[in-house]
Image (cartoon, helix red, strand yellow):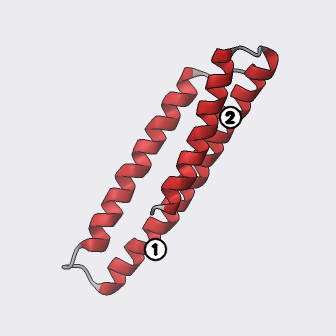
Amino acid sequence: MESICPIQIFNYHIGNTEYQRSAEQLRQLRDDETKSIDERIKANADLLALLEEQTAKEREQIAIQVAFARAEYEKNKTTENLVALRQAELELIDLSERLEGQ
């Protein structure tokens, strides 16, 4: 398996920041009592769609990290590689728990 390039991780974090910024703007619009009910309902629906898209991309990225860590561990069964695998798996669990809490 090809290694994950630092630029991929950087791009992932930049993309995640963009999602967070957009989500906050939609939350502000949704919560703005000076806006019409229709505008607020649309902002809420758009927020839901954005969060679902972000979650799918985040889950995909974490799955790649887990697969990479698993491949590295299978290739070289060191404690360091096992820890990296467990950390990647924990990220997937953390994502699921975070989603349940929303």
Q: Give above or below for 65 relative to 54.
A: above
Q: Amino acid at mark 1?
A: Ala
Spatial CA span between label 1 and label 2:
31 Å
**In the rendered view, does 72 fall on the left or right side of 33?**
right
| Residue type beneath disc 2 | Val
Q: Quadrant of the N terminus?
A: top right
Q: Is residue 22 above or below residue 61?
A: below
**Can you name the residue that lies furthest to the bottom here?**
37
Where does the image place residue 18, in percent across and percent down from the top left?
A: 41, 46
Residue drawn where x is 49% and y is 29% of the image: 10
Camera-side residue: 11 or 85?
A: 85
Of residues 63 and 82, which is closer to you in this image?
82
Residue on which the image places disc 2:
66
How many numbered discs sit on the rendered protein?
Answer: 2
Marking on residue 69:
none
What is the number of the mark on residue 45?
1
For label 1, the SS is helix
